[in-house]
Amino acid sequence: MMRAAEAAGPADTIAAIATPPGEGGIGILRISGPRAEEILSGLFRRAGHAGETWESHRMYYGLVADGGETLDEGMAVLMRAPRSYTREDVAEIQLHGGSYVLQRAAALCLERGARLAEPGEFTRRAFLNGRIDLSRAEAVMRLIEARGAQEHRAAVREMRGGVTAFVRRAADQLYEIQAGLAACVDYPEEISEEEGAAEMIPRLEKLIALLRDAVQERSSRLLRQGLRVALAGRPNVGKSSLLNALLGEEKAIVTAVPGTTRDLVTGEMTLEGVRVILTDTAGLRETGDEVERIGVERTRKAMEESDAVLLVLDGSAPLQEEDLELLRSLPENAAVAVNKQDLPQRLTLPETDRTVIPCCAKDPDSLEGIRAWLRRFTEISDRMEVTQPRHLDALRRAAGFLESALETVRTLPPDLAATDLQSAQSALGEITGDQVDERLLDRIFSEFCVGK
Ligand SMILES: Nc1nc2c(ncn2[C@@H]2O[C@H](COP(=O)(O)OP(=O)(O)OP(=O)(O)O)[C@@H](O)[C@H]2O)c(=O)[nH]1
Ligand SMILES: [Mg+2]
């Protein structure tokens, strides 16, 4: 274990293309480290400012040249330490965004003594140099990866220090508990064990509740993976038609032949900023056809793994034994869509406590009922501050240690809880990076893209 500031040693100079590969309007080359200025000066010739010292944070126009050959024209900026992303000298050169030019320019940096940056190495340096803590560094990556408004909001909240603030508050409360314990161990004649325990118990309970509250799994999973919804029902009731209508594209094959869909078909849409992943399934029925049988098995599995299940019935046909069976076995999180409302209705639905939604796959306006039902699942409480698996894991471990400490304090001399309290503190420290080891850093930053 080490503290962030201790880990920062003398650094070499790293360089990478910071923009994604392929053609683009501009491409950015980024250099960070003690030799950034020297390397920049060597390959970028400023128009009208040759020989002058670089003014920090100023954009210059000029040419990138390899010896006598001009590679491209562009803009360059030098950001002197510590006012930069990494807190080192950072140079950024904007060129035309073609991979050949960028790669040649990157190669020039390497010739001049830079090393190719590892994935996430710029952000890692920002962390090691104490500019951002670990949860904020991770949030940068979440922001880059965000695919919907909710994910984006969560990432921004983390980047602005939401998780850090939360964890620091929890850590402070824990320090107070630890200090209380130390006082009762050091001054037994002033604070008895009973008094010490009586003071610790409510504080521990409060802190455990705070942590448990922050690790509600559903919300965090929703943000990371989206809402998974399975469309289930007998063959030919219009599941695939509904999928297509909801997505607004012809994703699944629709025919009048029962048993058309034989495997899972998945499509994505966004609702209230949350990704919704719809899975169309093979119609559920007893079947001798091997392919269809496997499809039906997959359907059952998809239903089990979904956050919500929409059972589709055909309103134009009388209820059948299979419908009834499905209705009876519906999970808690299911609703019933009565489809084909445009046809004469012949369905009599038995009493059910599930939401019943009349709809017609051929009329997009009739799908609002389904969307309204889905929205109930996409609501995410604003209290929730922690979404990343690594953070959730650390918080759960911290809560676990605290629960064990609470158990000890209730039944045994309170000083026996000290180790658990310390372990809880360490688990909290892993989130902000106050206490991390090199391997954890390697794992976290290897998920980053190069140049970030
Ligand atoms: N009139 C009417 N026909 C519909 C409606 N929805 C679907 N259909 C028709 O019903 C038939 C079956 O539709 P699909 O969407 O393939 O049904 P499915 O439930 O996916 O069927 P399988 O894949 O066989 O399980 C097709 O001929 C559709 O055009 C609707 O709302 N109104
Ligand atoms: Mg189908």
Image (cartoon, grey):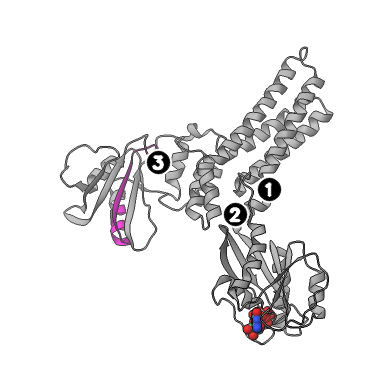
C-alpha distance separating marks 3 and 2: 27 Å
Q: How many marks?
A: 3
Left or right position of 427 against 234: left
Residue projecting furthest to the bottom: 257
Q: Position of residue 224 (x, y in %)?
A: 59, 55
Q: Which dot, 3 or 1, sits closer to the camera?
A: 1
Q: Which quadrant of the figure has residue 231?
A: bottom right
Report the span colored magenta.
84-107
Label 1 element class: loop
Q: Quadrant of ligand 1?
A: bottom right
Asked if marks 1 and 2 touch (Cβ < 8 Å), the reply is no
**Which residue is labeled 2 in the image?**
223
Type of amino acid under label 2: Leu
Mark 3: few/some/many CA within 10 Å (<14, 14-19, 20+): many
Mark 2: few/some/many CA within 10 Å (<14, 14-19, 20+): many
Q: Kindly identify the residue that appears in the image at 63 percent across and 44 percent down.
A: 383
Mark 1: few/some/many CA within 10 Å (<14, 14-19, 20+): some
Is 335 drawn above or below residue 208 in the view shown? below
Type of amino acid under label 3: Tyr
* Quadrant of the image containing the N terminus: top right
Q: Kindly identify the residue that appears in the image at 72 percent across and 28 percent down.
A: 418
Residue 216 tag number = 1
Asked if marks 3 and 2 touch (Cβ < 8 Å), the reply is no
Residue 85 tag number = 3
Left or right position of 96 against 308: left
Q: Which quadrant of the figure has residue 165?
A: top right
